[in-house]
Image: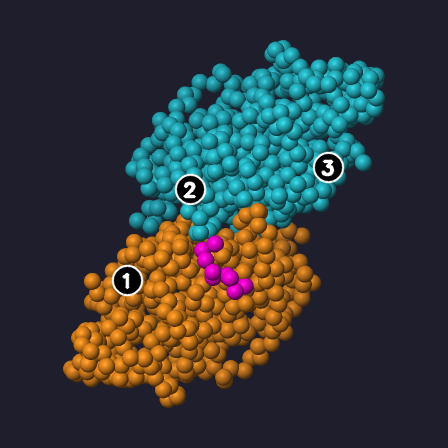
Chain colours: A orange, B cyan
Amino acid sequence: MGRPVLLLLLLPLLAPGAAPAVHPASRALGRLHLPTKPTPRHTVVKNYSVRYFHQKVNHFGFSDTKTFKQRYLIADRHWKKDGGSILFYTGNEGDIVWFSNNTGFMWDVAEELSAMLVFAEHRYYGKSLPFGNNSFKDAKHLNFLTSEQALVDFVELIKHLKRTIPGAENQPVIAIGGSYGGMLAAWLRMKYPHIVVGALAASAPIWQFEDLVPCGMFMKIVTADFKKSGPNCSESIRKSWDAINRLAGSGSGLLWLTEAFHLCSPLTSEDVEHLKEWIAETWVNLAMVNYPYECNFLQPLPAWPIKEVCQYFKEPDTSESQLVENVFQALNIYYNYTGQTKCLNISETTTSNLGTLGWGYQSCTEMVMPFCTNGIEDMFEPQSWDFKKFSNECYKQWGVRPRPSWIGTVYGGKHISSHTNIVFSNGNLDPWSGGGVTKNISDTLVAIFIKDAAHHLDLRANHAQDPESVLQARLWEVSYMKQWIREFHRAARRQR
Amino acid sequence: MGRPVLLLLLLPLLAPGAAPAVHPASRALGRLHLPTKPTPRHTVVKNYSVRYFHQKVNHFGFSDTKTFKQRYLIADRHWKKDGGSILFYTGNEGDIVWFSNNTGFMWDVAEELSAMLVFAEHRYYGKSLPFGNNSFKDAKHLNFLTSEQALVDFVELIKHLKRTIPGAENQPVIAIGGSYGGMLAAWLRMKYPHIVVGALAASAPIWQFEDLVPCGMFMKIVTADFKKSGPNCSESIRKSWDAINRLAGSGSGLLWLTEAFHLCSPLTSEDVEHLKEWIAETWVNLAMVNYPYECNFLQPLPAWPIKEVCQYFKEPDTSESQLVENVFQALNIYYNYTGQTKCLNISETTTSNLGTLGWGYQSCTEMVMPFCTNGIEDMFEPQSWDFKKFSNECYKQWGVRPRPSWIGTVYGGKHISSHTNIVFSNGNLDPWSGGGVTKNISDTLVAIFIKDAAHHLDLRANHAQDPESVLQARLWEVSYMKQWIREFHRAARRQR
């Protein structure tokens, strides 16, 4: 049978330090956002106020009037009451402060657009917990964690800001988001075009659902990133799974693997699938953050980290044990670039700023993203997409069943051409670009495909080592935003 | 203090025979749809199958998987598998068979458009009750009665039809609805443009919310209908309230009123407000169904019924008692055109095909329509819009509070210009036209304003006495629908 379908976790759902095992269902889902921190070199001052807004827990019913406090950040240093604009970050699955720190683009363009910056936290993440510590207690408490509710949170917050901040009322609002936040930005424009004049949806895989794109696309792109980063790189990784499997077949082999990988806890035969998931996740993470400059995220990483990793996979013919030792060296780039790490913990791959529980639930309800591998077009062990199994595991963990066609039903799948004013940006190195919009749909639904860019590099702060392509992409993005702003004012003048 | 704010009920919320008093809150709200039955002369055969589709009670959450059976009617006599289309009636607050019988327009144009006709019942009405007899039990059971849930019902049903009816998959669907159903048709296109290629929204007062239109507009139009239907007509009605008030001030006056109005039960001083509400409602109903031909609805009515009513109000100077007797004669046109009615029942003004309870709840939650009168620009007793009082009464009756700004938040209020392919039709005689779209918004959001037409006359079957204006309106409507269908096929060809 090979690995369970749930191997295909993309970013881990275990917070660092969260020792207890998480049910595999929560691991299947693909963490969209990236654990990156701004480079220390960056000099734009990020001064903001932290505020809270009372949101209804359930926007779509009237019997329950409970509210919760949604956190948002607001920065108005460059904002102009007259002729200014509002850039609204549609928060995704994590702490909004962390997203704000990792969306330097907005800070960089604030002055040029005389923009107020608003970063709105997504319900059930960070400090925006509808039921406090009970928010993840059971399916009943989680019932209001949906993209539809989150979009209304954004709408209500924007209306509140316009109502309460003198000067804001007659200003255009632009939605900006990356990854799942990019999906939300696009959907906000699609569903509430009276609220935002346009959306910049960076690395937003709005088509990573149902059969809109082949399920193998994602891992194929991961593989391509490794393939182009060094000779024999992806081939060696492809071979490594068998080597691990064979070594894990005996007690002495398990011991050897524990030592070879410098694991913090001894590997048991039950852990082997988990070990391979963790390694696969690491390759995926590297593909997403394969940035052109040294960058401090989960752990510090060098520029073009996959190139560094591939240094260890040059040799075509190595023994199995040597290959496994090379895998360790490669992992070490990701987990121990500073040399401070004493041992590797297979329960950790990403930052605690991401809300692993929340995203686990979302993946088991709305955000059903099919992934698969065949071991031929990709460097992973073959794994088909088994929805039934996935659904059963979701039910076991959360007491809910996923609705795989729901997102398409609500947001239109590939039939979105009647919408307007959305820029979809994607990097060619980003595995999520496979589920993104990479070709223009119309004059006002445009795609920007960025060479040499990983997961929403364009949303990060300007950096001296940014490739030309991303500089150009940011110029286009600003130019579209200016156009939407101009159109807004033109329409407003006509109405006067 | 005068009459309570809740006088401004437009169509009654008491089903005939439903003796127990309904709380006034339920009467405030404006029944949108009209109690009319097709004229017997009409000859288009209305053959349909009755079907049921399992819908989730809650589309917007995952913890509860309950379903209910939504009823729909389907007629495919003229449908062509190749090159045909689907006309989808977005059911409103009542029995879908009754709406189907009163939407002759769809039956009339089916052949020309090679169209399958589908009439979908709105949840909580007719036979589409999410919790059977318990559906109206309390706020918890009513919690899923919202326009957002109803729209998703329509979307899921259309997807189901396309999946299961061979040939339907690649056909364009057009939403059609009248009154609240017209609002739903427009909103369906706005929110789910990937599901319907366009919408015909007949007499849809999508702006009868908040302060989008003056609250007095509705009753002003009712008054204008009476004013233009005979000399002294609206003036006499304006005077009649004082006459009733004065007569109701004494026991003998109450007795006299009971006899003058031929009431089934003796009038008490507590009933007087109710009596005046009932009379006002009758004038409103007459304004809505002021059709150019004899027509059998609640009770049979003559052609241009307001003209008939105004026959009794010609004299400028009559005594108060004579005026009240004239009011009775006028009411008699509405309640006793056939001469079979023995006495008048002030708890009845409309057909039992409308779902009074459901609409009462909807008006107390989403469908908050402010109405007011000033007795100067209209012929009613002055009554301001008192939201607080209204809200308290809703809370008393249903345990919920209305959200007056919600519909604007969700559907955009007057900021809808980014949407496309909606025809808004309105009749100049229809009081609901005051809250409708009566001017073009863009090339593809167009208004058709129909002279000499009351509430969605254009959706009724062709009739020999239809005015030119409505014939022309129907031609335009068909022409827009054909254009949407052509565009759909053109886009489909491009994708191939």
Q: Secondary structure at mark 2?
A: strand
User: What label sits on residue B5 in the rendered view?
Assistant: 3
Q: Secondary structure at mark 1?
A: helix
Above or below residue B40? Residue A316 is: below
The answer for how far apart the CA atoms under marks 2 and 1 are is: 30 Å
Image x and y of residue A485, in percent: 57, 62
Of all chains, the one bearing label 3 is B
User: What secondary structure is found at the residue carrying circle 3?
Assistant: helix
Q: Is residue A23 left or right of residue A102?
A: left
Q: Mark 3 or mark 2: which is in front?
A: 2
Q: CA distance from mark 3 to mark 2?
A: 38 Å
Q: Quadrant of residue B290?
A: top right
> How many numbered badges does the structure rendering display?
3
The chain containing the residue under callout 1 comes to A
In this orientation, does residue A245 appear?
Answer: yes
Q: Quadrant of the N terminus of chain A?
A: bottom left
Amino acid type, mark 2: Thr
Q: Determine whether A19 is above or below B115 in the image.
A: below
Mark 2 burial class by Cα count in 10 Å: few <14, some 14-19, many 20+: some
Residue segment shown in magenta: A132-140
> In the image as oriented, which residue stretches furthest toward the bottom?
A339
